Amino acid sequence: MSLASALPVPTSGGLAVLVAGAVLLYVVAAVPVGPVKRMSAAALVGGWSLHLLLVLVAMAHFGQAGGRWGFGPVLSMTVWLVIAVHTIESRLFPLPQVRVFLGGAGALAVLLAAWFPGEARPAQSALGPLHFALGVGSYGLFGAAVLHAVLLDRAERRLRGPRRHGAAVTAPGDAPAMPLLQLERLTFRFVEAGFLVLTATLALGVISTSAGAAGWQWDHKTVFSLLAWAVFAALLVGRRMRGWRGRQATRWLYAGALLLLFAYAGSRFVWEVFLTRS
C-alpha cells in the first residue's frame, strides 16, 4: 500500500481549505514586501507542505480508483518537485529572487490543479504507477535544470553587460549567491539525472505496451517524448565531445524541455481546455 492510498480523501470543503492555504502562503512568498518580507522563506516551505498534501490526495488510491491524470496535476507535481530542490539548495545558497518566482509558480500550479483536476482512472498495467512516477520525476528534474539554466544565463549576461570605466555594472544585491562554475555543473547534473529518468520512463513504456494488448502507439506523446530525448542526448554529447557551454547549451536545454512539456502536459492542456474533453 502506498502512502497516497493510505491517506483519507478529504471532502470538497477540506480540499478548498488546503488549496486556499497553499495559495495564500505561496503568495506571501512571492510578494515579500512590508511586514511579511521576513516570512517569505517560511511561507514558501509552508505552501510547499500543503502542496504536498494536495499532490498525495491527487494520487490517492492510484492502483484502484486511479490517480489524477491531466495537465493540472502533472504541472502541480512538477512545480512541487522544483520547489523541493530549491528548499534543499537554499540551506547552502540562499536565492531570495528565485523564491519570489517559485512562490508565484506554486500558487498558479495549485490553482490550475484545482480548476483542471483531470480524470481519475485505474492504471492500465502493474507498471503503470511506476511509469507515471518516473515521467513526473523527469519533468521535475528537467524543471530544476531549466531554473538553474535561467540563473546561469542571467549571471553570464551580468558578466558580459555594459561596463563603466572597465567595471561591469550590476544592481545592488544582484550578485549570484552560487559560484558560476558550480551553478553550471549543477545545471547539467540535473540534465543528466533527468535524462536517465526519462530513458527509464521510455523503456518502461515500451515494456508496458509490449506486455499489453494495445501494443506500441505512435501518438503525440510518444513522438514528443522521443524528440525531447534526442535533444537532451544531443546536448549531453555536444557538451562532452565539443564542450558546449553557456547560451549554446542552455538553448538546447530549453528546446528539449519545451518538447517534453508538449509530450503530456501541453497536449493535455489543449485536450482538456480547448477541446473540453477530460
Image: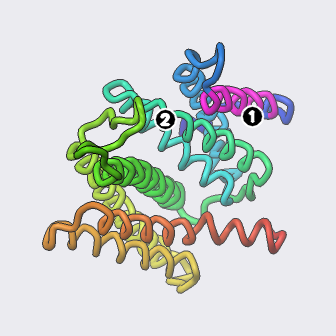
In the rendered image, which quarter is residue 268 located in? bottom right
Amino acid at dot 2: Gln
Is the stretch drawn in magenta largely helix, strand or loop? helix
Q: Give the distance between the C-alpha atoms of the residues marked 2 and 1, in whole angstroms.
A: 24 Å
Left-right relation of 182 to 131: left
Highlighted magenta segment, given as a residue range: 16-31
Sooner in the amino-acid sequence: mark 2 or mark 1: 1
In the rendered image, which quarter is residue 252 located in? bottom left
Q: Dot 2, crowdedness within 10 Å: few (<14), some or many (≥20)? A: few
Residue at the disc numbered 1? 19
Name the quarter where the C terminus is drawn.
bottom right
Under circle 1, the secondary element is helix
Name the quarter where the N terminus is drawn.
top right
Please determine whether, in this image, residue 58 is positioned above or below residue 259.
Answer: above
The answer to if 22 sits in the magenta stretch is yes
- How many labels sit on residues? 2
Relative depth, front residue between 127 and 43: 43
Residue 126 seen in the figure: no
Residue 164: where, in percent of width, then height?
Answer: 31, 45
In this view, which residue lies farthest toward the left? 241
